[in-house]
Image (spheres, helix red, strand yellow):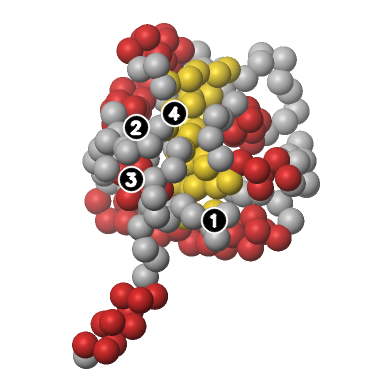
C-alpha cells in the first residue's frame, strides 16, 4: 500500500511557481452575475501579478455602468466593448479574441460570469499547473444559475465538452467551444491566427 501511494504521488504534478495570469470574461446583460462573482475574481490572493479583462458584448442593462464603477476601484480590471458595427460574426469568439489580444500575460484564463470562484485562492490553485510543458489546462467550475444535483450534472457536461475538444485545441485550432474555465497560452492562440481557422466563425 505504501509503494502504491508513493507511485501515485510521484505521478501527481508538482505545484509550479506562480506566473502572471490574465483572466478574460465575456458578458452580455449579466449585471446580476457580475455583482455576485466579479468581486471575488478581483480580490484573489495571488502571489504574482494578474489582471481581469471583461469584454462587454453590447449589453443594454446596467452592465456597462457597473463595470465602470468597479474599474474605478480596481486598477487591475480592464473593460473592453465589442464595436456596435460587428455583424455576421460570432460575438462570443470576437469577445474572447479582443480580450486575449489585449491581455498583458502569456497565460489566459477564460471563465464565464456565472462561474463561482470557490475562494480568494481560486487562481492560485488553478494556475499552479502552468509550466513550460503545458499549453492548456482545463478547470472545473460551479454555476450560479444551476442549483442542486443539476449543478453537478452541468459541471460534468462542461468538463466532458472541454476534454472532447482538447485535441482540436492542440492540433490545428485554438479552443473555440464553451470556455467556462480554461487556461490557455496566448502565444499558441496567436500562432494559429486565433479563431480564423474555425469554419464556424461566421
| Quarter occupied by the N terminus | bottom left
Where on the picture, by quarter, is residue 124?
top left
Q: Residues within 10 Å of mark 3 (few under 14, many from 20)?
A: many
Q: Secondary structure at mark 1?
A: loop
Where on the picture, by quarter, is residue 71?
top left
Report the residue at 71% width, 20% height from top.
Answer: 86
Mark 4 against mark 1, which lies toward the viewer? 1
Report the residue at 55% width, 60% height from top.
Answer: 133
Which residue in the protein does label 2 denote?
41
Mark 2 against mark 3, which lies toward the viewer? 3
Left or right, residue 165 beside residue 155: right
Whole-number angstrom distance, CA of label 3 to CA of label 1: 17 Å
Q: Secondary structure at mark 2?
A: helix
Counting from the top left corner in percent of width and height, residue 90 is at 67, 33
Which residue in the protein does label 4 denote?
51
Mark toward the start of the polypeptide (4 vs 3)? 4
Which residue in the protein does label 1 denote?
132
Counting from the top left corner in percent of width and height, residue 136 is at 54, 54
Mark 3 against mark 1, which lies toward the viewer? 1
Q: Secondary structure at mark 4?
A: strand
Q: Secondary structure at mark 3?
A: helix
Report the residue at 50% width, 18% height from top.
Answer: 79
Mark toward the start of the polypeptide (3 vs 1)? 3
Mark 4 against mark 2, which lies toward the viewer? 4
Task: Tell me if label 2 and label 3 are in contact, CB under 8 Å.
Answer: no
Task: Tell me if label 2 and label 1 are in contact, CB under 8 Å.
Answer: no
Residue 129 in view: yes
Whole-number angstrom distance, CA of label 4 to CA of label 3: 13 Å
Amino acid at each position: 500500500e505504501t509503494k502504491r501511494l508513493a507511485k501515485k504521488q510521484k505521478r501527481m504534478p508538482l505545484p509550479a511557481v506562480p506566473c502572471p495570469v490574465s483572466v478574460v470574461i465575456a458578458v452580455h446583460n449579466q449585471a446580476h452575475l457580475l455583482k455576485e462573482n466579479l468581486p471575488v475574481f478581483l480580490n484573489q490572493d495571488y502571489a504574482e501579478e494578474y489582471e481581469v479583462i471583461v469584454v462587454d458584448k453590447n449589453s443594454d442593462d446596467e452592465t456597462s455602468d457597473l463595470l465602470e464603477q468597479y474599474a474605478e476601484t480596481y486598477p487591475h480590471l480592464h473593460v473592453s466593448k465589442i464595436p456596435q458595427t460587428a455583424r455576421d460574426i460570432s460575438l462570443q469568439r470576437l469577445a474572447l479574441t479582443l480580450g486575449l489580444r489585449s491581455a498583458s500575460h502569456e497565460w489566459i484564463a477564460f471563465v464565464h460570469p456565472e462561474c463561482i470562484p470557490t475562494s480568494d485562492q481560486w487562481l492560485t490553485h488553478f494556475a499552479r499547473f502552468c509550466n513550460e510543458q503545458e499549453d492548456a489546462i482545463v478547470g472545473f467550475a460551479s454555476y450560479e444559475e444551476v442549483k442542486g444535483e443539476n449543478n453537478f450534472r452541468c459541471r460534468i457536461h462542461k468538463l466532458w465538452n472541454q476534454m472532447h475538444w482538447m485535441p482540436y485545441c492542440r492540433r490545428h485550432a485554438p479552443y473555440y467551444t464553451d470556455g467556462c474555465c480554461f487556461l490557455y497560452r496566448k502565444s499558441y492562440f496567436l500562432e494559429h491566427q486565433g479563431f480564423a481557422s474555425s469554419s464556424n466563425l461566421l
